[in-house]
Image (cartoon, helix red, strand yellow):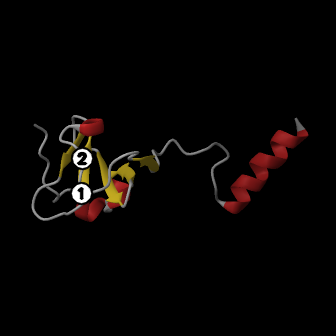
């Protein structure tokens, strides 16, 4: 009980939450036998982002997660983390 009280007091003094954030984070995925230039159409639920964003893909059916291809791996993040909230809303969503 003393340990919990000490952690709560310490977290309030430091200004950080005592529980982990529920904010989604970024992750990496290996492309195995492919690279950025030969990702087969429809692989891993990826769609190329139009309008000149080379090596950028939407992941899944919606437009909430963006993946960037770097050599033979994908870095995928929620769009607000990847581009920031001021820019992410102007990226065109091709949800087809």
Q: Give the residue drawn at x 11%, y 45%.
A: 94
Indicate the position of residue 53 as horizontal and vertical percent values.
18, 63
Q: Nearer the viewer, residue 11 or 45?
A: 45
- Spot the residue most to the front: 33
Residue labelled with disc 2 = 58
Q: Is residue 79 something one can see in this rendering?
A: no
Local crowd at mark 1 within 10 Å, few (<14), some, or many (≥20)? Answer: few
Kindly state the secondary structure of the residue where label 1 is placed.
loop
Q: Give the residue drawn at x 38%, y 47%.
A: 31
Mark nearer the N terminus (2 vs 1): 1
* Quadrant including the N terminus: top right
* Up-down relation of residue 95 to residue 92 (above or below): above
Indicate the position of residue 46 as horizontal and vertical percent values.
24, 42
Kindly state the secondary structure of the residue where label 2 is placed.
strand
Indicate the position of residue 58 as horizontal and vertical percent values.
24, 47
Q: Give the residue drawn at x 14%, y 48%.
A: 93
Indicate the position of residue 9 as horizontal and vertical percent values.
78, 51
The nearer-to-camera label among 2 and 1 is 1
Q: Is residue 65 left or right of residue 21?
A: left
Q: Nearer the viewer, residue 54 or 13?
A: 54
Residue labelled with disc 1 = 37
Q: Nearer the viewer, residue 64 or 59?
A: 59
Q: Is residue 68 left or right of residue 3?
A: left
């Amino acid at each position: 009980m003393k340990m919990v009280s000490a952690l709560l007091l310490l977290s309030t003094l430091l200004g950080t939450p005592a529980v982990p954030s529920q904010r989604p984070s970024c992750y990496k995925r290996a492309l195995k036998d492919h690279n950025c230039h030969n990702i087969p159409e429809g692989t891993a639920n990826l769609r190329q982002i139009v309008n000149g964003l080379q090596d950028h893909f939407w992941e899944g059916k919606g437009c909430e997660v963006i993946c960037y291809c770097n050599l033979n791996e994908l870095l995928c993040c929620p769009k607000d983390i990847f581009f920031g909230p001021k820019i992410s809303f102007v990226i065109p969503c091709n949800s087809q």
